[in-house]
Image (tube, rainbow, N blue to C red):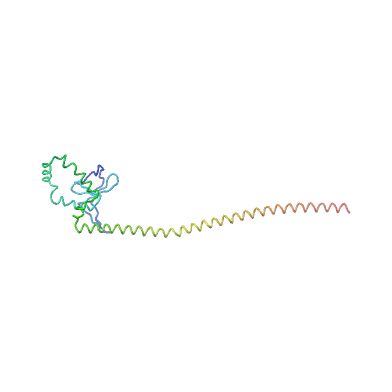
């Protein structure tokens, strides 16, 4: 039976693991390799016949050979029980599986078949293609952002120039108001002088 808990965390979803050779319209899955979603949001892979789990999908398939030899039948369990008490041999097994699941050993890699190695190479190639695509997309967005930055600088320059023109117009308006005030003063003084001249003419006549 597939694991229902991994390191004390409950499994909330259990589905067949997807193969790296899947393509649009052709979904290839491993029925005996399970994709497990844990309660905390993390993901691991597990065996469909026992509680063995691993972070590496490729380490599950070599483990399935254990079940093909019939080690999961009741008889081998009885022989292990007779050879040693369960509390000394069976209890440490989950910890050993956890360490194996954290990092596959050299022996596990050596036991992979050619097909499994090819599948692993395809997965690596697929990840590289996705990485290169992400880099190209980032470079494209960087190129698109360059004209936008240039337009922003031009907009700021236009705003600064408009502000300078506005200040100059305000200065001209202030000078014009000052000139009008001076002209009115000169006009008043001219009218006053003209009135004095008329008085002097009246006196002399």
Q: Residue 26 location in percent, x, y?
A: 25, 58
- Position of 135 compared to 17: left or right? right
Query: Quadrant location of the C terminus?
Result: bottom right
In percent of width and height, residue 31 lies at 20, 52
Q: How many marks?
A: 0
Q: Nearer the viewer, residue 31 or 5?
A: 5
Q: How far across and how far down the image is residue 7, in percent?
A: 25, 43
| Residue situated in front as seen by the camera: 87 or 58 | 87
Residue lying farthest front? Answer: 106
Residue 75 left/right relative to 200: left
Observer-nearest of 173 and 127 = 127
x, y percent for residue 50? 18, 47
Furthest toward the right, the residue is 205
Considering depth in this image, is 63 or 72 the residue closer to the camera? Answer: 63
For residue 25, which quarter of the picture? bottom left
């Amino acid at each position: 039976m597939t694991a229902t808990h991994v390191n004390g965390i409950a499994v909330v979803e259990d589905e067949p693991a997807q193969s790296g050779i899947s393509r649009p319209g052709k979904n290839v899955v491993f029925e005996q390799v399970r994709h497990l979603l844990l309660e905390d949001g993390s993901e691991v892979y597990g065996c469909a016949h026992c509680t063995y789990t691993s972070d590496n999908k490729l380490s599950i398939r070599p483990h399935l050979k254990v079940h093909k030899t019939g080690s999961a039948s009741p008889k081998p369990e009885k022989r292990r029980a007779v050879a040693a008490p369960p509390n000394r041999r069976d209890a440490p097994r989950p910890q050993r599986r956890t360490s194996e699941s954290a990092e596959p050993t050299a022996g596990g890699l050596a036991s992979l078949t050619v097909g499994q190695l090819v599948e692993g190479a395809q997965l690596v190639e697929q990840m590289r293609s996705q990485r290169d695509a992400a880099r190209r997309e980032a470079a494209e967005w960087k190129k698109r952002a360059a004209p936008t930055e240039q337009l922003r600088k031009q907009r700021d320059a236009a705003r600064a120039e408009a502000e300078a023109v506005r200040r100059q117009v305000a200065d001209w308006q202030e000078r014009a108001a000052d000139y009008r005030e001076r002209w009115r003063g000169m006009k008043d003084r001219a009218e006053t002088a003209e009135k004095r001249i008329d008085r002097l003419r009246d006196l002399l006549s």
